[in-house]
Image (cartoon, rainbow, N blue to C red):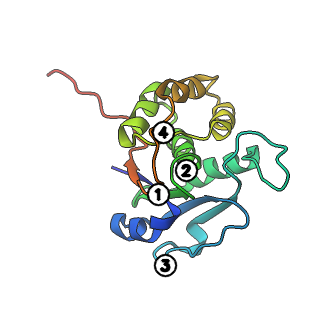
Amino acid sequence: MPVIVVSPLSRIAEMAVRHRASEMISLMAKEQTFHRPAVIAADRHLLLSMNDITFSGNAGLVAPGEEHVLQIIEFARQWDRSAPLLIHCWMGISRSPAAAAIAALAVEPDQDETELARRLRAASAYVTPNSRLIEIGDRLLSRNGRLVAAIKAIGRGADADGNVPFVFSPLPEPAVHAG
């Protein structure tokens, strides 16, 4: 079963090696530099420059935009799912969980947003997905407000120190049939 590994920047090399990830999405502020783990090929690394903010107009900061979300969707749809997809931001709590939810809906659009949000919360008590990314993803994936409502329903995550990577299934749990 394919998985998405969500990580803070400080643990991407460890998570890439531990989970044998071969593809990665980075959501980092423009001025933040880091080294791509050697196990991630350069052509399978998507680097998106944005700050963890929910509105535009902050001088010098880049708000998540439609172009960022379109790239997340396209990259996720090209993910072959033979190895985990690693998604990270600075702390692994806001931008990367939002991108993980968007990627999950991009690769498996026939799933319920509420169940997806519950899986995200079950995977991590700390996530508070960036609301701007979620709103744009909701619109671009034609979720008609359901993704926004589902993420709001799980509420703000618990306080964290930014050292809490987690594994998230982009696929709904298979239905159990009485037989």
- Of residue 124 and residue 111, the one placed in the foreground of this image is 124
Of the residues shown, which amino acid type is indicated by label 3? Answer: Ala
* Residue pictured at 52% horizontal, 63% vertical: 9
Q: Which residue is mark 2?
A: 96
The Cα atoms of the two marked residues, 2 and 1, are separated by 8 Å
The Cα atoms of the two marked residues, 4 and 1, are separated by 22 Å
Q: Position of residue 106 (x, y in %)?
A: 56, 42
Q: Nearer the viewer, mark 2 or mark 4?
A: 2
Left or right: residue 22 compared with residue 26: left
- Label 2 close to label 1 by CB (< 8 Å): yes
Tell me which label, 2 or 4, sits earlier in the chain. 2
Tell me which label, 3 or 4, sits earlier in the chain. 3
Q: Residues within 10 Å of mark 3 (few under 14, many from 20)?
A: few
Residue 38's label in the rendered image is: 3
Of the residues shown, which amino acid type is indicated by label 1? Answer: Ser
Q: Which residue is mark 4?
A: 108
Left or right: residue 99 compared with residue 168: right
Q: Position of residue 93 (x, y in %)?
A: 51, 48
Q: Is residue 46 above or below residue 109?
A: below
Of the residues shown, which amino acid type is indicated by label 2? Answer: Ser
Tell me which label, 1 or 3, sits earlier in the chain. 1
Tell me which label, 4 or 1, sits earlier in the chain. 1
- Of residue 109 and residue 139, the one placed in the foreground of this image is 139
Q: Which residue is mark 1?
A: 7
The Cα atoms of the two marked residues, 1 and 3, are separated by 16 Å
Of the residues shown, which amino acid type is indicated by label 4? Answer: Glu
In the rendered image, is residue 114 in sight? yes
